[in-house]
């Protein structure tokens, strides 16, 4: 059985789409998943990147694109009333609800659908309280242990080479993005391509222009 570490942030519509479609894409395969909530903003800052919603023209396209993807893949998706927003309360809540140290699929599903279902404000206090009552956190989401766990998840993702979400880590290979799900499926299904130069030889390409050039 293969084990997948799924790095996610509830602020990302692509992470939501990948979360919803993952079981369907991997149907028939033997695998397990660990869900790791991470702070996407910290990962982007580490790599010197802006999020799609921080670039005005790209923001408009991103919102159109994810709504189309939801329509095309039959995943209900409604843009939240405010986006981007500070995802820390939701990330900490998900970690605070972890059973036996693991944030399970039910928890992630509830938080993702809180954000991407219905078009409400993800941080509206009454809605947050309803979500908290649904999930019954094991500890206070503001507890130091929860904050430390989120930092650990995020730092671990950065150390692993994660530069965005959704990201899937399996057998020391990273797959990034909603559109990487078919590629992940083929790897788990044993496609011999992954043993050839297409995967490993990319590091041999000489880098030309850089941001400092």
Image (cartoon, rainbow, N blue to C red):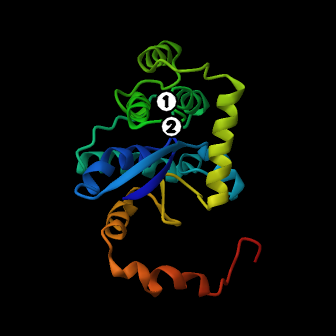
Task: Tell how many labels.
Answer: 2
126 vs 160, nearest the viewer: 160
Q: Is residue 194 left or right of residue 68?
A: right
User: Mark 2 Cα within 10 Å, few/some/many (few <14, many 20+)?
Assistant: some
Residue pointed to by mark 1 = 99
Q: Is residue 100 above or below residue 135?
A: below
Residue pointed to by mark 2 = 102
**Does the image show residue 49?**
no
Q: Is residue 44 left or right of residue 35?
A: right
- Residue 155 on image: x %, y %: 68, 49
Quadrant, the C terminus: bottom right
The answer to whether the residues at label 1 and label 2 have Cβ atoms under 8 Å apart is yes
- Residue 206 on image: x %, y %: 64, 87
Q: Quadrant of residue 120?
A: top left
Residue displayed at 57% across by 33% down: 87
- Residue 124 on image: x %, y %: 51, 18
Quadrant, the N terminus: bottom left
Q: Is residue 96 left or right of residue 63?
A: right
Circle 1: element type: loop
């Amino acid at each position: 059985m293969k084990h997948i570490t799924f790095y996610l942030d509830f602020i990302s519509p692509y992470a939501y789409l990948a979360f919803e479609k993952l079981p369907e894409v991997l149907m028939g395969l033997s695998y397990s998943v660990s869900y790791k909530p991470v702070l996407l903003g910290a990962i982007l800052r580490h790599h010197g990147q802006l999020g799609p919603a921080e670039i005005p023209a790209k923001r408009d396209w991103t919102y159109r694109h994810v709504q189309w993807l939801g329509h095309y893949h039959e995943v209900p998706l409604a843009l939240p009333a405010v986006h981007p927003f500070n995802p820390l309360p939701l990330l900490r809540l998900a970690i605070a609800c972890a059973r036996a140290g693991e944030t399970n699929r039910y928890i992630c599903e509830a938080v993702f659908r809180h954000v991407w279902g219905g078009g409400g404000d993800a941080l509206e206090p009454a809605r947050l309280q309803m979500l908290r009552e649904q999930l019954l956190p094991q500890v206070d989401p503001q507890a130091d242990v929860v904050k430390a766990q989120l930092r650990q998840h995020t730092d671990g993702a950065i150390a692993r080479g994660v530069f965005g979400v959704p990201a899937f880590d399996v057998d020391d290979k990273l797959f990034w993005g909603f559109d990487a799900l078919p590629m992940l499926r083929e790897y788990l299904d044993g496609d011999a391509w992954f043993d050839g130069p297409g995967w490993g030889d990319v590091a041999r390409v000489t880098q030309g222009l850089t941001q400092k050039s």
